[in-house]
Image (cartoon, grey):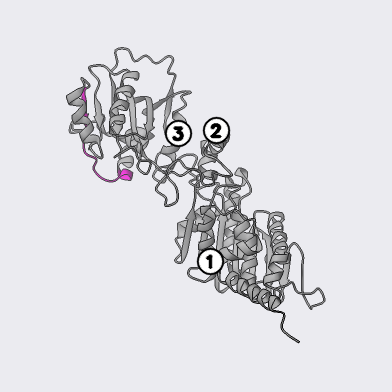
């Protein structure tokens, strides 16, 4: 009786695919979920999870906007792959609510039950109900070989089980929880006294969330800077240099275009947008520069006729999006008070910067008595030279900054905390301006803050009659 060559070939092919899938998380996904649509950000996360499973490091922190595929990878496909690699893995997954954690549990079970998984890994299956202590529910399922997947809610009990793989997926439900100091403290206490105490030797950990608050669980974890931690932080719209996209590009444009995201920004407001979608939550009151320090005036009643309007500009190197924008501030100094008329920022090339300075100054009441100061860095020095030569504007270099940006901000606290800086009521630009001030020094850009501090330092004499640098 001869061999059935086709069956031998099929068996060899399946065995080869199984070997590849065990070694490669990406190939595992391609085999068991052939309709999965990979975007580059999925591949970044997949690569990190691969190295985590190989114990190249101990903890992965993932910060991504809502509905961008992090939970399917982290809480469903990754556990299934880990069981395909090692049926003795002990996995605990926690989320803000047990219901969400149990849903991830069920989704993982569906992957393990799928025809594709069964074909490649026939020896990986659930423990039979007849086995002593074997469980298969939405809270826990056991794998033959000693492995288990246990679901829990953040703050709930996790008794009698250990973890070689520990996952926290979305520990915060909503803004109400995030803004509650009581909830944040309770979640942190649960994390330190319950969740991490279940870790077995050489356990690996994933904390995966959309950011809500600068003091949320991820914020506290990152603040402690544990050795062996790798961080993936991917904003919905790129704000700084990245390998796979340029500033302004959407993270997953096929599903969530830039226009759609900008609509969400408008709907959610700047605070929620910066936290949930851009992964850079800032304290409501601000860190170094407090929101409540700013005073307000009615722009319809405030008359600038007969008053000197001054300007301060902070320029960037080029219009390329990897650099910071050029920003300008227009203000009137009355006694010790600063009345800001406008603050704006744009990405511009050198010729655009010159036009920006002229247009911005003209529309905000430039007069022969005005002083336009330009910070002497980047293109600032060249801009001053060109404008002096080609225009009649009174343009001069500001004093070279001394100290870093944080030190400069601290040097302005007297004017700011003393309530001597006034913003016009109802102006659209004031929201982004305050957001950048509140987020400083952790904002993606700080050019408006540079203009603010440059304004105060340039127009505040010292006791000796010289200006701050």
The C terminus: image quadrant: top left
In the orientation shown, which residue stands out farthest toward the bottom?
1
Please, what secondary structure does the residue beneath circle 1 have? Answer: helix
In the orientation shown, which residue stands out farthest toward the top?
305
- Numbered disc in front, either 3 or 1: 1
Quick check: can you spot residue 74?
Answer: yes
Is 195 on the left or on the right of 324, as rendered?
right
- Numbered disc in front, either 2 or 3: 2
Q: Nearer the viewer, residue 296 or 341?
A: 341
Is 263 on the left or on the right of 391, as rendered?
right
Question: What residue range appears in magenta?
Answer: 394-407
Q: Residues within 10 Å of mark 3 (few under 14, many from 20)?
A: some
The alpha-carbon separation of the residues under discs 2 and 3 comes to: 12 Å
Label 3 vs 1, first from the N-terminus: 1
Judging by the rendered image, the residue that carries numbered circle 2 is 266
In the orientation shown, which residue stands out farthest toward the right?
130
The N terminus: image quadrant: bottom right
Which quarter of the figure has residue 118?
bottom right
The alpha-carbon separation of the residues under discs 2 and 1 comes to: 37 Å
Residue contact at pointers 2 and 3, CB within 8 angstroms: no
Judging by the rendered image, the residue that carries numbered circle 3 is 432
Quick check: can you spot residue 190?
Answer: no
Give how far across and how far down residue 139 sits, in percent: 73, 63
- Numbered disc in front, either 2 or 1: 1
Label 2 vs 1, first from the N-terminus: 1
Please, what secondary structure does the residue beneath circle 3 have? Answer: helix
Which quarter of the figure has residue 113?
bottom right
The alpha-carbon separation of the residues under discs 3 and 1 comes to: 39 Å
Residue 257 in magenta? no
Judging by the rendered image, the residue that carries numbered circle 1 is 50
């Amino acid at each position: 009786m001869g061999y059935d060559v086709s069956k031998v070939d099929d068996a060899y092919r399946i065995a080869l695919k199984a070997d590849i899938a065990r070694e490669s998380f990406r190939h595992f996904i391609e085999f068991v979920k052939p309709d999965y649509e990979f975007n580059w950000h999925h591949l970044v996360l997949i690569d990190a999870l691969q190295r985590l499973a190989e114990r190249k490091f101990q903890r992965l922190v993932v910060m991504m906007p809502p509905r961008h595929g992090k939970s399917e990878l982290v809480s469903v496909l990754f556990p299934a792959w880990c069981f395909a690699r090692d049926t003795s893995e002990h996995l605990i997954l926690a989320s803000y609510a047990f219901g969400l954690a149990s849903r991830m549990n069920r989704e993982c079970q569906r992957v393990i039950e799928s025809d594709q998984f069964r074909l490649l890994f026939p020896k990986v299956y659930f423990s039979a109900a007849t086995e002593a202590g074997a469980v298969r529910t939405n809270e826990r399922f056991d794998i033959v070989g000693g492995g288990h997947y246990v679901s829990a809610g953040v703050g709930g009990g996790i008794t009698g089980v250990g973890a070689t793989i520990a996952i926290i997926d979305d520990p915060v439900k909503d803004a109400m929880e995030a803004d509650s100091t009581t909830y944040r403290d309770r979640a942190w206490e649960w994390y330190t006294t319950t969740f991490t105490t279940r870790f077995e030797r050489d356990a690996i950990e994933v904390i995966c969330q959309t950011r809500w608050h600068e003091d949320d669980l991820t914020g506290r974890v990152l603040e402690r800077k544990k050795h062996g931690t790798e961080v993936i932080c991917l904003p919905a719209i790129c704000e700084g240099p990245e390998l796979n996209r340029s500033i302004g590009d959407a993270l997953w444009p096929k599903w969530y275009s830039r226009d759609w995201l900008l609509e969400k920004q408008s709907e959610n407001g700047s605070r929620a947008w910066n936290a949930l979608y851009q992964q850079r939550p800032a304290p409501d009151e601000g860190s170094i520069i407090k929101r409540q320090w700013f005073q307000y005036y009615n722009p319809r009643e405030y008359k600038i006729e007969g008053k000197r309007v001054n300007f301060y500009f902070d320029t960037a190197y080029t219009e390329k999006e990897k650099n910071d924008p050029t920003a300008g501030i227009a203000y009137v100094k009355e006694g010790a008070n600063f009345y800001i008329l406008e603050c704006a920022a744009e990405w511009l090339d050198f010729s655009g910067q010159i036009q920006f300075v002229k247009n911005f100054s003209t529309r905000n009441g430039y007069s022969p008595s005005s002083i336009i100061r330009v910070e002497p860095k980047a293109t600032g020095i060249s801009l001053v030279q060109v404008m002096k030569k080609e225009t009649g504007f009174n343009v001069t270099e500001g004093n070279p900054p001394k100290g870093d940006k944080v030190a400069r901000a601290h040097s302005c606290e007297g004017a700011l905390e003393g309530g001597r800086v006034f913003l016009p009521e109802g102006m659209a630009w004031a929201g982004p301006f305050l957001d950048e001030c509140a987020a400083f020094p952790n904002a993606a850009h700080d050019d408006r803050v540079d203009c603010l501090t440059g304004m105060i330092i340039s127009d505040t004499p010292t006791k000796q009659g010289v200006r701050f640098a």
